Structures are given as structure tokens and as C-alpha cells.
Image: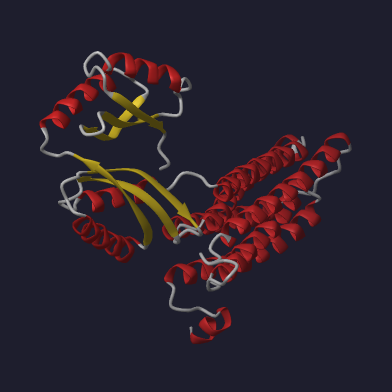
């Protein structure tokens, strides 16, 4: 075991070790299965079996890319990359998607050629048993890799595992085409190969789409945001929290910001103590570097209590308005502040603004209304 640790350069990070070990296992198993299938396919003249062998070889490459990505992602932050190199894993997933797409395209071209120019098959029950045995191994490897990837939040491992599991199902189709040939002496091998190649291409497109989303900046993790909101709202001096944004620089490197509502009667020093405690606790318990914005609110002021009921009635009558916050009645400035959170299906924000002003102005004549309309980031 020590020799293995030294060879793979395992360290103290459980997540990285899990990715390295799982990827190494994938490389070894897929290379063995690939060689076996290509040999069997060549002996039986089965393009479907050969295609599976080629796909298994690409699986070995994707596992190797996942291994390389894990190694590169562990590099420490530097002047050019102050947030670390965690996003290398997203580039790895992108490379894996390209490999899967190329393999699928080559399989499709070969299958189409055989549809128009078929070749005789030499299928045996022994070859089918070998393909079936490799399917069981691939399914087990795929499920294990997917579970490990989900546990350690590695998109590249999940992609590799999904591809492995799909290969197991594809192998069943290959066996079915071989049985049809043996029983009915009709070859549908090329058509099965074409179908398998389309499945591989679809898997590549799915991985590519997920990788591009990560690189472009998808929404923050909802479960992480929910935990952070619970942590923040557990602070007695925080009345409400909203407008959270989360940006990741790798699966376990998160930064973000959030606005918190605090009674405007508190001093700057008191607010600082509250936010400093929260910032340290969030970093220690959730490993998120969070910046806080402050929104003043009047907790026990009757004019704010009454205003809240008025706004609640309006929001309750609007299906596309998910919530509101930052509600504050600044008596000195004669201004009412409020933020609406709407869903992405609402296109006409100006109409919503006009409706709210038409609703609120008769109830609060002469008051300046500052309404902010926004969507959620997580």
C-alpha cells in the first residue's frame, strides 16, 4: 500500500486521493477490457465489438485525463492564479467530452460504411460470454466511479462513470445482435454499431454542455446556499439575508457575497462585531469566503411593520414575484426602498414596476419609491 501511495503521490487530501485512485483504476480496467474486445471483435469480424473496444480505449484516456486534472488542480495559488487552480478540473471535463465525441464520430462513420458494404460475421457463444463478462465489470466500474465522483464533487469522474455505465448497456445490445445473427443468420451488427455511436455522441454532448456551464459560470450550489442562509439567519442580530452570490474556483473553492438586514439603530461597531463573527464562522465551517453588504431595516418601527403588510399583499398577488427584501421606510429622506426577486420567466420588468408604483403611491402619497427588481443567483 505504501508503494502505491508513493507511486501515485497520494497526500493528505481525501478528495484528491479518491479521484486519483478511482481514475487509476479506470485506466487499468479499461485498457484490459479494450484489448480483449478489440481482439475478440477482430477474430469474429464484428464491428460492434471492435467499436466497443475502441470506446473502452477512449474510456481509459478519459480516466487518465481525470487523473491529470486532479494532479494539476492541486497546485498552490500563485500571482497569476490567486484563487488556485481548481478550475483545471472543468478543463479536464471539457477534454473528456471532446475525446468521447471523437470516439463516437469514428464509430458512427465505421458503422455507416458497413451498412452499405457489409462484411461476414464469425460470432461464437464464447465471444458473447466474454463481452457479457466485460459488461458486468464496466457496469460495476461505472457505478463506483459515478458514486465516487458525486461524493467528492468531481464532474470529470461523474462523466467517466456515466460513460462506463452506458457502455455496459451498449454491450447488451451487442450481445443481442450476435444472438440474432446466430439464430436468424441476419446481421444487424452495423446498425447496432451506429446506434451505439449515437449514444456515445450524446454522452459527449452532455459532458460538453456541463463543462461549458461550469466554465461560463453557472448558478451557485443551492444546497450550499441554503446552509449558508441558515448559518447567517441563526445570528440573532441579523433580521434577514438575501442577494447571495457564489463563485467557485474549483469544486471546493468558493467565494461570494450576501446582503444582510440589520436594525438601523445599531452602531457601526456593533454591526462590525456581528459580521466579523459570521465571516469567520462561515469560513471555518463551510470553507466559503463571504463578503457582507448591510441593509438597514426598522425592526420595531410601526411604519415599517405596516409597510411590510402592504408589500406582502402585492407580492402575494404576483405569481412571478418570488419574494421581497431590503424593505425600508426612510422617514427623513421621505423614501421607500424595496427589492423584488422575480423568476427568469418574467420578461416585462417595466410593467411590474408600473403596477407596483400604481399600487403603492395612493397608499403613500408624496413618497419617493426606490424599487429594485432582480433575479436569484443561486
x, y percentage for residue 186? 77, 35
Q: Residue furthest right?
A: 117
Considering the image in quadrants, where does the C terminus appear? top left
Say how the picture is coloured.
Answer: secondary structure
Query: Which residue is at 75% across, 40% downward?
Result: 189
x, y percentage for residue 165? 55, 50
Query: Which residue is at 41% across, 29% downward?
Result: 343
The one of 157 and 240 positioned closer to us in this rendering: 240
Query: Which residue is at 67% across, 56% downward?
Result: 95
Quarter residue 373 falls in: top left
Query: Which residue is at 76% across, 44% downward?
Result: 105
Q: Is residue 83 left or right of residue 121?
A: left
* Residue 148 position (above or below residue 245): below
x, y percentage for residue 53? 71, 56
* Residue 270 position (above or below residue 358): below
The one of 199 and 49 positioned closer to us in this rendering: 199
Quarter residue 13 falls in: bottom left
* Residue 213 position (above or below residue 140): above
Quarter residue 369 falls in: top left
Can you see residue 179? no
Amino acid at each position: 500500500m505504501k508503494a502505491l501511495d508513493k507511486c501515485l503521490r497520494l497526500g493528505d487530501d481525501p478528495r484528491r486521493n479518491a479521484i486519483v485512485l478511482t481514475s487509476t483504476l479506470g485506466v487499468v480496467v479499461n485498457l484490459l477490457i479494450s484489448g480483449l474486445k478489440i481482439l475478440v471483435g477482430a477474430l469474429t469480424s464484428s464491428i460492434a465489438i471492435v467499436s466497443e473496444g475502441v470506446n473502452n480505449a477512449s474510456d481509459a484516456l478519459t480516466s487518465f485525463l481525470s487523473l491529470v486534472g486532479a494532479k494539476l488542480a492541486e497546485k498552490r495559488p500563485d500571482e497569476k492564479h490567486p484563487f488556485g487552480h481548481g478550475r483545471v478540473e472543468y478543463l479536464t471535463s471539457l477534454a473528456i467530452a471532446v475525446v468521447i465525441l471523437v470516439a463516437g464520430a469514428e464509430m458512427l462513420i465505421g458503422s455507416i460504411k458497413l451498412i452499405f458494404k457489409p462484411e461476414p460475421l464469425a460470432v461464437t457463444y464464447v465471444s458473447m460470454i466474454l463481452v457479457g463478462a466485460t459488461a458486468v465489470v464496466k457496469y460495476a466500474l461505472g457505478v463506483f466511479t459515478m458514486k465516487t465522483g458525486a461524493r467528492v464533487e468531481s464532474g470529470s469522474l461523474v462523466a467517466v462513470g456515466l460513460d462506463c455505465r452506458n457502455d455496459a448497456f451498449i454491450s447488451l445490445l451487442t450481445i443481442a445482435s450476435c444472438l440474432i445473427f446466430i439464430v436468424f443468420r441476419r446481421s444487424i451488427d452495423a446498425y447496432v454499431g451506429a446506434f451505439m455511436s449515437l449514444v456515445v455522441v450524446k454522452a459527449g454532448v452532455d459532458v460538453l454542455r456541463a463543462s461549458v456551464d461550469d466554465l461560463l459560470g453557472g448558478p451557485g450550489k443551492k444546497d450550499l446556499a441554503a446552509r449558508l442562509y441558515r448559518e447567517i439567519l441563526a445570528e440573532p442580530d441579523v433580521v434577514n439575508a438575501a442577494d447571495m452570490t457564489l463563485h467557485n474556483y474549483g469544486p471546493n473553492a468558493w467565494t461570494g457575497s450576501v446582503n444582510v438586514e440589520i436594525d438601523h439603530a445599531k452602531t457601526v461597531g456593533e454591526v462590525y462585531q456581528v459580521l466579523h463573527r459570521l465571516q469567520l464562522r462561515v469560513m471555518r465551517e463551510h470553507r466559503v469566503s463571504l463578503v457582507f453588504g448591510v441593509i438597514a431595516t426598522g425592526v420595531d418601527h410601526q411604519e415599517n411593520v405596516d409597510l411590510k403588510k402592504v408589500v406582502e399583499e402585492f407580492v402575494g398577488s404576483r405569481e412571478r414575484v418570488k419574494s421581497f427584501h431590503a424593505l425600508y421606510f426612510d422617514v427623513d429622506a421621505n423614501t421607500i426602498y424595496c427589492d423584488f426577486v422575480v423568476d427568469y420567466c418574467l420578461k416585462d420588468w417595466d410593467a411590474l414596476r408600473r403596477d407596483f408604483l400604481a399600487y403603492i403611491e395612493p397608499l403613500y402619497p408624496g413618497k419617493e419609491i426606490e424599487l429594485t427588481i432582480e433575479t436569484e443567483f443561486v
